[in-house]
């Protein structure tokens, strides 16, 4: 599949950091940054944009903040190899803590929000646009949003100046038919805008659903090295790059950095296909119970987990 | 997706056994057998049908042979809970070693073949039909077969009496577009026959491609518990059963037997998504080099593996 408009966004540090509280070494982040540049990936999402004091820097690491001096440590003196982006959650970043683009190494801010936060997200994203950044809004957990609320949110987004809107399968619930239907809806209701996709891999469908999205005209594609990410993780970047036929992409630097930096983490933390994640995905539930199970001493007690997940509330 | 013609075939013992030379205990096989029955799965492929002496029973275990007394140990005295099938490879079973159906607990024989073996496969499968079994032909590795040879094979299969023909993605190479195209070709060239699908998971597409197959009218669906199988493994049965909406299916007994029997094996042998398997899948290569890599002491040297897999022959 070769379509010049397609852009690939690596979320290894940002989404992977949800699994280890961003305890990545500077070497890890630097090696990922150089590998992505060599591989022809378009954007690296290097973390979250949070106000200092909102979290403990020692507990959460630098990539929960993405301060300019953090970014400079990674980029070094050379010319930047790849566009950088950071994610902003509503309420965790004060507007006056966002520098002007001319004072920042970030190129883009991606605002994550739930459907009831769309107005706040538009306000924040337009603020970032006004400061000189590219901006997206990533509308999360749409698998639990009813049609009327979704259509209202899309209508608000259509009227905004935000040029890129993401379809996010936060729970890893969607099958390809869902992606077909939603991609068509987003394209129809958001004329002139670019649509993005961010999938989770609870049912081993993150890559397949990203392909379905591409076929439906979605052009901003999120992925992570070896699929690292919250819970079941994301669409594996190496699969996506080997699928896309744009000659600018090269999968080898990704294999190399997976070997050097990601495989060691895969032995310390469990992301990927595990039954608790599969169960919450199939049931269209938030993964928090599955994550708690995987972090507990009884992570293999999957039948008990299934019974709890499917029991009716009393 | 509810379509009464859909049949699900579990290949846990047969394809999973390729990873451990069928060193499953009788308790493992018995617990899988009972769980599949409770879950409403239609067939259990319990191993290979081979002539005694063709392999060493001690080295390969009972399920490389599937002799009647092996089967009886599993079934016990009660009524059979699920149809049983075994796979036959060309040249590894003498015709006179196949009992009449009336003397066997097997219901079906599935004949695996490469495209150049189609005539032999038809002969063997029709022999099994004549002895009273159901029979299928599973045409392997079609991702490396040219169009003319494939059409000739399909033409021969169309003329045969074998009622069920499988599309097999042996190398885990296919994307959903390939499945769409091939499913349509198989349906068109094999009028009146039932088509089956057997996927490998090298690119995390086995489940997604099985869904694509279902959408295209394919009705015999192979899967294994937790995806256990050669190399990257197969379509995970628990995902498939939770996708299919036929009320006869129940995923809970599968979760239970995964906990009891399959998770312990997952700590001893490596099937699933690993970069060497991803590389051979994406390159449309036989997984043997990846399997050798994964069994070696340098299994994490994935960049070397990539360089070897992509180097031109000298």
Image (spheres, coloured by chain):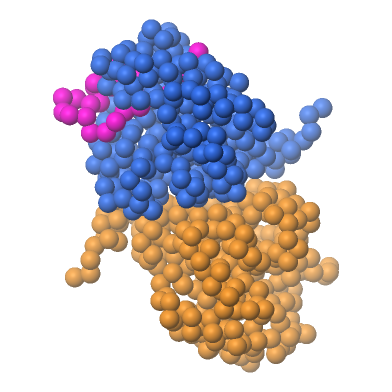
Chain colours: A orange, B blue
Residue range (magenta): B66-91
Identify which residue, A7 or A27, lies in the foreground.
Answer: A7
Residue A292, quarter of the rendered image? bottom left
**The N terminus of chain A lies in quadrant:** bottom right
| Residue A44 spot, x, y in % from top left | 68, 67
| Residue B97 spot, x, y in % from top left | 37, 9
Question: Is A130 positioned to the left or the right of B267 in the image?
Answer: right
**The C terminus of chain A lies in quadrant:** bottom left
Question: Is A72 positioned to the left or the right of B103 in the image?
Answer: right
The answer to whether residue B149 is above or below residue B246 is above
Determine the residue positioned at 36% across, 64% down. Answer: A289
| Residue A216 spot, x, y in % from top left | 60, 63
Say whether residue B197 is magenta.
Answer: no
| Residue B134 spot, x, y in % from top left | 36, 25
Identify which residue, B87 or B120, lies in the foreground.
Answer: B120
Determine the residue positioned at 72% across, 77% down. Answer: A107
């Amino acid at each position: 599949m070769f379509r010049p408009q397609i852009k690939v966004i690596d979320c290894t540090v940002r989404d992977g950091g949800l699994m280890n509280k961003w305890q990545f070494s500077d070497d890890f982040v630097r090696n990922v940054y150089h590998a992505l540049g060599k591989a022809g990936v378009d954007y690296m999402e290097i973390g979250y944009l949070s106000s200092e004091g909102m979290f403990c820097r020692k507990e959460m690491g630098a990539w929960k903040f993405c301060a300019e001096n953090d970014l400079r440590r990674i980029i070094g003196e050379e010319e930047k190899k790849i566009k950088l982006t950071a994610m902003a959650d509503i309420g965790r970043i004060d507007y006056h803590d966002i520098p002007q683009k001319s004072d920042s190494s970030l190129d883009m801010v991606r605002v994550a929000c739930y459907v009831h936060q769309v107005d706040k997200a538009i306000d924040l994203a337009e603020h970032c646009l006004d400061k000189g950044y590219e901006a997206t809004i990533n509308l999360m957990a749409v698998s639990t949003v009813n049609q009327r609320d979704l259509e209202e949110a899309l209508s608000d987004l259509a009227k905004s100046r935000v040029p890129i809107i993401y379809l996010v399968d936060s729970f890893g619930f969607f099958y390809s038919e869902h992606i077909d239907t939603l991609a068509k809806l987003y394209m129809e209701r958001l004329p002139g805008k670019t649509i993005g996709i961010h999938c989770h891999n609870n049912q081993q469908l993150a890559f397949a659903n990203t392909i379905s999205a591409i076929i439906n005209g979605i052009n901003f594609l999120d992925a992570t090295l070896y699929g690292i990410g919250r819970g079941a993780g994301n669409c594996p970047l190496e699969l996506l790059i080997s699928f896309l036929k744009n000659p600018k992409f090269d999968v080898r630097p990704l294999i190399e950095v997976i070997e050097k930096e990601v495989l060691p983490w895969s032995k310390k933390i469990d992301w990927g296909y595990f039954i608790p994640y599969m169960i919450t995905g199939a049931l269209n539930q938030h993964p928090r119970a599955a994550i708690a199970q995987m972090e507990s001493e009884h992570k293999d007690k999957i039948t008990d987990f299934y019974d709890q997940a499917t029991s009716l509330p009393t």
